[in-house]
Amino acid sequence: MTMSLDGTVADPERFATVFDAHYEEIRRYVGRRLDLDIAEDLAAETFLVAFRRRHTFDPARGDIRPWLYGIATRLVGRHRRAEVRRYRALARSGPPPDGDSHDQRVVDRVAAGVTVQRLSAALAGLSRGERDVVLLVAYGELTYDEVAAALGIAYGTVASRLSRARTKLRDALGVEL
């Protein structure tokens, strides 16, 4: 959903529409990067920061979504060590169990475990900037322009970071990305 803060800035009570439209998406993004236990708190903090800084949002620069992802990404950055620890732990242990039958869980877990372990290790090996760009594109489904806006960097920087990250991930995983 494309939404602008145009008109919501002057009326703080209308900011609730921004929260309602994007909270769950931001919570999922943070939960994928960190632990689900932290996701709700950081997603809520994202909207608290956005509300407090709503006067700094410039609708002429684009949609509100990248702005929110930028705030969330900076908050995740405060928990960078936890993110890297999580990827390293996943690389060692594999994905959590699900609710399927025991036999199917074993087969799925073995197959997914190899993939999750390798991917987690590869993500842990990326630089902060590369990981931010990759995960904003993969988890947030942001365009290069939106990632640039979210992180406050140039489009070319997004492209070069993503290119370097893809090369590193391709080498680590042995697959074409």
Image (cartoon, rainbow, N blue to C red):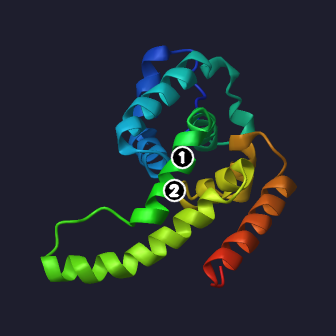
Residue 175: x, y in percent? 63, 84
Residue wearing tag 2:
87
Residue at 51% across, 15% down:
11
Circle 2 sits in a helix, a strand or a loop, which is it? helix
Q: Which of 109 and 65 is in front in this view?
A: 109
Residue at 66% across, 84% down:
176
Residue 42: x, y in percent? 46, 32
Tag 1 near tag 2, CB within 8 Å: yes
Residue 78: x, y in percent? 60, 32
Q: Can you say which quadrant of the picture contains the C terminus?
A: bottom right
Q: Is residue 35 above or below residue 163?
A: above
Name which quarter of the figure residue 53 lies in: top right
What is the number of callouts on the image? 2
Most distant residue in the front direction: 92
Residue at 56% across, 59% down:
141
Residue 55: x, y in percent? 65, 18
Q: In this view, does 22 lie above or below 88?
A: above
Question: For the residue carrying disc 1, how many other residues have a C-alpha within 10 Å: few (<14), some (14-19), or many (20+)?
Answer: many
Q: Say left or right for 176 vs 19.
A: right
Question: For the residue carrying disc 2, how many other residues have a C-alpha within 10 Å: few (<14), some (14-19), or many (20+)?
Answer: many
Report the Cα–Cα distance between label 1 and label 2. Answer: 6 Å
Residue wearing tag 1:
83
Q: Is residue 30 visible?
A: yes
Q: Can residue 1 be seen in this view?
A: no
Name which quarter of the figure residue 40 lies in: top left
Q: Identity of the amino acid at label 2?
A: Tyr
**What's the mark number on residue 66?**
none
Q: Identity of the amino acid at label 1?
A: Glu
Residue at 25% across, 65% down:
97
Q: Is residue 15 above or below residue 22?
A: above
Name which quarter of the figure residue 123 lies in: bottom right
Circle 1 sits in a helix, a strand or a loop, which is it? helix
